[in-house]
Amino acid sequence: MDISRFDFFAANAPNEIPFWFEYKEPNAPQRPKSFDELGLDEEGADYSIVREWYQGEQYITLPDHLKFFGESWQKYWDEKVAYDLRQKINAYFAWRIYYADRMCQLEKQHL
């Protein structure tokens, strides 16, 4: 089996991605509004319920008219987990491609 120099370098790239290498997955999920952006009256019951829920008390059930807030955040968290995983996977391969490309360029310069 014949392997190209590019494939060789990509396969043998260092496993640890250096701190200076940046890869950014496109289409990051959009963060929904925070509780203070909802325009709720700070003295009202809705404000304190939403604030507690937003600060991590997810056992609190949001009132029906505010369920959209909880649903938008749950959707964001689910999308963020998937995005972060895609980011790690694609950064791994992008690093290997970058490394192989640079090594091939350096090799050509020294021949």
Image (cartoon, rainbow, N blue to C red):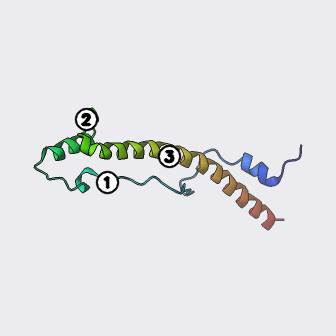
Which structural element holds mark 2?
A: loop
Residue farthest toward the front in the current orientation of the protein: 65
Residue farthest toward the bottom in the current orientation of the protein: 109
Give, as a three-letter code, the residue at label 3. Answer: Asp
Is 2 left or right of 12, judged from the image as shown?
right
- Residue at x 21%, y 45% (from the top left corner): 51
Which residue has dot 2 on it?
61
Which quadrant of the structure image shows residue 48?
top left
**x then y, percent, for residue 31:** 38, 53
- Residue at x 67%, y 57% (from the top left corner): 98
In terms of depth relative to the viewer, which is nearer, 56 or 108?
A: 56
Which residue has dot 3 on it?
84
Q: CA distance from mark 3 to mark 1?
A: 20 Å
Give, as a three-letter code, the residue at label 1. Answer: Lys
Foreground tag (3 vs 2): 2
Mark 2: few/some/many CA within 10 Å (<14, 14-19, 20+) = few
Mark 3: few/some/many CA within 10 Å (<14, 14-19, 20+) = some
**x then y, percent, for residue 76:** 41, 47
**x then y, percent, for residue 81:** 47, 42
Which residue has dot 1 on it?
33
Q: Is residue 44 visible?
A: yes
Give, as a three-letter code, the residue at label 2. Answer: Thr
Q: CA distance from mark 3 to mark 2?
A: 28 Å
